[in-house]
Image (cartoon, rainbow, N blue to C red):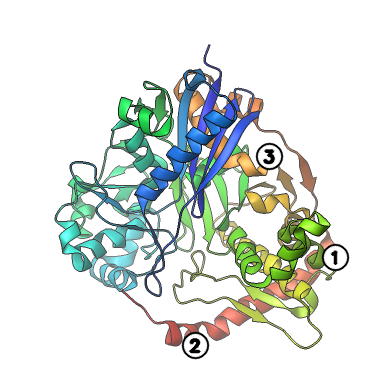
């Protein structure tokens, strides 16, 4: 009897591969690295073929290292980063690197389309404001800036759909990723031909829309040879990484909320009624019949990875001697600094910012430095800045009527007890932490499990697999301190945004 489910996560800095038993136990896991390319200011792109190579290498390594029989895998689920624009030709060849979610090169295209069509009209249909980070303007950018690529485009794929295509040969677009293209009718959850024409996007570029748990095909003989999975293994469409992480954190009921602690930050509130706000992100949940009202920020766990890379050389040198990773050492020095970082406030706008300010020119800022401040102050302020961005999104969501009473944390950042407590204190909300490192891949395998009939429902799957490891309650004294920092946080951006725009500018 087939006893395993395989999850593939196409993240920004790496792919993660994890093998699960039916009860959610992780049997094996591995990662595969690839690059983000920054050829110009405002550009951030990746090579999808490098994703596939990393996935194949990682799967083969995992199967070999853990002596897993490929025939024992019942199904494959895939999640992926949002807002890719992968152009493939009729033979399935990738025609160009895809701009990723951090890319803001197409700002002027958004400005023009919002003016020509009407920002309100676009929002009314799609439930999302037209911003350069989304897929929409990237497709138009190909037309205007890379005509040699555009004229050979057969389909535009999302990240998880690309891996599913490489595995099965089938071209699809799952519903949870539909929102990245603004001719997606959010209420009807189908492509709108009239808006395709208005946005200058050929309808033929858009693949068939399918539910995230639908089996779209089986591993081909060619893919089997390349990645090591057994030919014939069922593959489901998969979905948006934030939505799969939301499912893997246990959020399957309206009102439940996921807090995201991966490379990017943010939150996802599950709803069974349509409620959109142009300052936030609305997408279908991978759980049918629900939407996710999301806040997506550029500053998440990636802030600490950046800080460690640039400022933690001494900690890296000590790591072997003290037996603690450089990140753990940074965590310890941050713990010595009081809540509020003695007035140091950080704006985590490290690649512009997405919701709720939608400003591609926004920059990271440390405010409040003086000779008394230490590296510990900067580390803690970095963590607090990410938490303040989370609060900003939650506050906007509450204005729409989507209130979050408790957060379910996921992502590598949730491994830090300090950082999770800071988020609880800043937001004033309790936080439950399931198995944070595997929430996203767990969500992908739940989709696979439901798709192949291993689980009878999403609720059954979550009950069997999601296990809370710890809880955090907000310290309300710290919350009052953070309220003052939050006011400063908002004021810093308001006072600097014109300078940021003047010095950043819109680039294509």
- In front: label 1 or label 2: 2
Query: Which circle's residue, 1 or 2, is located before the other in the chain?
Result: 1
The residue lying at 65 percent from left, 50 percent from top is 412
Report x, y in % for residue 345. 69, 76
Cα distance between the residues tagged 1 and 2: 35 Å
Query: Which circle's residue, 2 or 3, is located before the other in the chain?
Result: 3
Q: Is residue 78 left or right of residue 150?
A: right
Cα distance between the residues tagged 1 and 3: 29 Å
Find numbered disc 3 in the image and state the secondary structure of the residue it sits on: loop
Q: Nearer the viewer, residue 121 or 303?
A: 303
- Total marks placed: 3
Find numbered disc 2 in the image and state the secondary structure of the residue it sits on: helix
Work out whether 165 lies above or below 458: below
**Which quadrant of the figure contains the C terminus?**
bottom left
Report x, y in % for residue 335. 82, 64
The residue lying at 40 percent from left, 75 percent from top is 41
Q: Nearer the viewer, residue 123 or 23?
A: 23
Q: Nearer the viewer, residue 395 or 244?
A: 244
- In front: label 1 or label 3: 3
The residue lying at 52 percent from left, 58 percent from top is 296
Q: Can residue 204 be seen from the camera position used here?
A: yes
Label 3 CA crowd tier, 10 Å (few <14, some 14–19, many 20+): many
Residue underneath mark 1: 477
Query: Which circle's residue, 1 or 3, is located before the other in the chain?
Result: 3
Residue underneath mark 3: 435
Residue underneath mark 2: 499
Tell me, yes or no, whether the two marked residues, 1 and 3, touch with CB atoms within 8 Å: no
- In front: label 2 or label 3: 3
């Amino acid at each position: 009897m087939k006893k395993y489910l395989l999850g593939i996560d196409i993240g920004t800095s790496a792919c993660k591969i994890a093998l699960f038993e039916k009860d959610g136990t992780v049997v094996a896991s591995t990662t595969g690295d690839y690059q983000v390319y920054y050829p110009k200011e405002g550009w951030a792109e990746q090579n999808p073929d490098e994703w596939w190579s990393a996935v194949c290498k990682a799967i083969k390594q995992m199967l070999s290292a853990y002596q897993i029989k490929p025939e024992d895998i019942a199904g494959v689920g895939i999640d992926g980063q949002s807002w890719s624009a992968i152009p493939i030709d009729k033979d399935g060849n990738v025609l160009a690197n895809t701009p990723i979610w951090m890319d803001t090169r197409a700002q002027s295209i958004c400005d023009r389309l919002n003016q020509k069509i009407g920002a309100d009209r676009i929002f009314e249909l799609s439930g999302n404001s037209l911003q350069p980070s989304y897929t929409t303007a990237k497709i138009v950018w190909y037309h205007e800036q890379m005509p040699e690529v555009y004229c050979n485009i057969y389909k535009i794929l999302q990240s998880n759909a690309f891996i599913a295509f490489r595995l099965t040969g089938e071209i699809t677009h799952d519903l949870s990723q539909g929102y990245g293209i603004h001719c997606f009718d959010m209420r009807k959850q189908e492509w709108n031909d009239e808006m395709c024409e208005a946005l200058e996007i050929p309808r033929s570029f858009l693949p068939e829309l399918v539910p995230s748990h639908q089996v779209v095909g089986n591993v081909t003989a060619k893919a089997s040879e390349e990645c090591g999975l057994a030919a014939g293994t069922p593959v489901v469409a998969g979905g948006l990484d934030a939505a799969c992480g939301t499912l893997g954190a246990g959020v399957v009921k309206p009102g439940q909320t996921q807090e995201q602690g991966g490379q990017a930050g943010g939150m996802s509130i599950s709803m069974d009624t349509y409620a959109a706000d142009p300052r936030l992100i609305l997408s279908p949940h991978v759980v049918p019949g629900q939407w996710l009202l999301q806040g997506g920020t550029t500053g998440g766990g990636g802030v600490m990875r950046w800080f460690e890379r640039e400022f933690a050389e001494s900690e890296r040198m000590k790591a072997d001697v003290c037996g603690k990773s450089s990140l753990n050492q940074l965590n310890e020095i941050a713990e010595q600094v009081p809540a509020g970082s003695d007035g140091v406030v950080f704006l985590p706008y490290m690649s512009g910012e997405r919701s709720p300010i939608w400003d591609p020119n926004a920059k990271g800022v440390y405010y409040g430095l003086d000779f008394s401040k230490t590296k510990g102050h900067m580390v803690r302020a970095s963590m607090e800045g990410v938490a303040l961005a989370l609060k900003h999104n939650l506050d906007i969501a509450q204005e729409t009527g989507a209130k979050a009473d408790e957060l379910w944390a996921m992502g590598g950042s949730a491994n830090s007890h300090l950082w999770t407590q800071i988020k609880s204190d800043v937001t004033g909300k309790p936080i439950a932490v399931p198995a944070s490192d595997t929430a996203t891949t767990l969500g992908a395998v739940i989709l696979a499990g439901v798709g192949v009939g291993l689980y009878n429902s999403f609720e059954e799957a979550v009950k069997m697999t999601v296990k809370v490891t710890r809880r955090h309650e907000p310290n309300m004294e710290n919350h009052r301190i953070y309220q003052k920092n939050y006011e400063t946080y908002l004021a810093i951006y308001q006072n600097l945004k014109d300078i940021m725009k003047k010095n950043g500018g819109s680039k294509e």
